[in-house]
Amino acid sequence: MSRLLPAQCGIVSQAKSPSITETTSSGSGVIIDDLPPFASLTTDEEREKKAERSSPGTYNVVVNQDSFQHLPEYSDDPDIKTESLSPLRRGSIAASIASSTGRDIPVEGIPIPGDPNVVVLPRFEDIGRRNTFSHSKDTKSPLSPSVRHTIIKVEDTDGAVFTAEPESYEDNQQIGQDARYLRQFRHAVWRQLVPTERDVRDGMAMSSVNVLENAARTFPPLHHAMMAVAALSLAIREGKERLDALQHYQQALPALQNSLKSPNDLSSDGAFLTHFLLLVYEIAAAEDGHSNLWSPHLSTLLRITLLRRDVYGGERFPFVVWWICNIDLNALFSGAGRGEYVGYMLSHDIIPPPSFHLHPLGLDGSSVVYEEELDSLPTILQLDYEVTILAVRLGLLSREFRHEASAFISGDMLHRAESIRVRQTRIFEVQEALRQLWVAPGVSMVSQLAPNLPTRSKLLYEHAASLYRACILYSHTSMWPGQRLETSPDYDTEIAVASNQILDMTRKALAEDRSDCRYLVFPVFMAGYASLDGAQRMVALDLIRTMEKTSIGRNTTITRRALAAVYEKQNERFMNTGQSLDVDWVEVMAERDLRIVNFGV
């Protein structure tokens, strides 16, 4: 059950962004806390005042099954159940009496031993508290006590105001299941899709998932898409049938078609976000040998992205465009995609710049940067952007080189040698650009501070650092079949160092219980493939196996199976020829019908 205590908060944005006004209770400054201990308070009003007047901290008002027994909607007595309740606020009998007398009925909480700031309410009092997600016309039943969750938090002065979880978002007839799927979407699916958000572990206040939830309230296809992805991830995790996921997916498509009354309707926020989630669904659900159903959604997303630029003169959710670019980059690296989306965006110079990559956005449309992030986040955002752009260039080059290699006539050795020389020259340009990024003074300073950076800065730096090293490995080993044989031994040290750094980085992330950082899976795959050390190769396989357990889709499982198949092929090749450098992981995956669209999903 959501019961929120208000906090006084301020958000500091970049100097170029308008700041969000800090809330104060009065012009007099400090408010004196003259209230008794939290556990002895008896009304919500007193608890709110206590939260407002105390130093930043956390106060928990816990409700359980027994707290709701007196409510008419949870009573076993049919006479009480049918008692007339206001459509605007389905309150308890006690609350109705309180409102008629103009006062609250005191409900003293039972303190929890060892923590005076946590109390259990023996009786839930519903007095029509403010809820930013409620709608005055909504007459649907509230969530049952067994499925409602409490997020009660008082943030410090540079935090953000928490908002209540929606009271009536779920379908009335499937309230329990939909509530479960909504929690799964928020706390599992979204954390993996967008792992670099601020304070996401403490709640959903600053999470971009709110963008989708808000849009879904007026756009049913998006609701079904959210439920489909969540149901799919639960089915995969629990090893169950995907009937619920498929049902929601099949409801989303016709609902989406029915919502499009004119060509411009495709540019709506709902259509854009729905196609984004349908893309995620198809990637997560991809089966061996049938992994191309995601591609039409990506093509549609490109059309929608361009249409939105024409209709609105820009993009309201540039961070979503950035996510799509990264998804397409993954498919480009794996060979499953052609880079249609990200390649077009790059060639037309319309990839969102780094100041628009994070949610939330300020009043000027750019990403908000908080006070503690000012010394690190702008530099890291720029670094992450530059590394990603170079990664896209590398992926597009690889596609070109592989096509060229497939058309090569084996007898023309002179042409082959010249072709390889040209390829290596073009690759070297990208490699040097990557290396120069990493020795820039600002980046070097941030690298030294990495362990102590604020959350968003740390995670974005980790993304950039792991992608940079994965690109180094990819550029030396995977640009075309057999490339490693033609790579100078002078680069063996660079390859070994990059592999070890990726594995160390991932071990630390998993030790910190950050398996939701799925951007690490592809670098670990590359580290395992490129490493010549048998022990390190096994470490890579074990790390992917660990991350596989929490994946919302099947791609990480296929990634682990693909790496094991590559090891098998390399061992076989070494036994027959004394070397295994010419084993190409893209070819092995094609032979075994192991198609990966996104390594981490």
Image (spheres, helix red, strand yellow):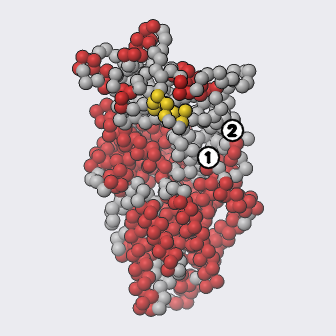
**Does residue 400 appear anywhere in the picture?**
no
Q: Residue at x 64, y 26 (%)?
A: 53
- Classed neighbour count for the residue bearing mark 1: other residues with Cα under 10 Å, few (<14), some (14–19), many (≥20): many
Q: Residue at x 39, y 64 (%)?
A: 557
Residue extending farthest left: 78
**Element type at mark 1:** helix
Q: As displayed, is residue 307 above or below residue 144?
A: below
- Classed neighbour count for the residue bearing mark 2: other residues with Cα under 10 Å, few (<14), some (14–19), many (≥20): many
Location of the N terminus by quadrant is top left
Residue extending farthest top: 101
In the image: residue 151, left or right of residue 505: left
Name which residue type carries label 1: Phe
Q: Residue at x 49, y 11 (%)?
A: 103
In-front residue for pair 112/79: 112
**Residue, disc 1:** 356
In-front residue for pair 49/368: 49
**Element type at mark 2:** loop
Residue extending farthest right: 441
Q: Position of residue 257 (x, y in %)?
A: 34, 41
Q: As displayed, is residue 129 above or below residue 599?
A: above
**Residue, disc 2:** 12
Q: As displayed, is residue 190 above or below residue 137?
A: below
Location of the C terminus by quadrant is bottom left
Name which residue type carries label 2: Val
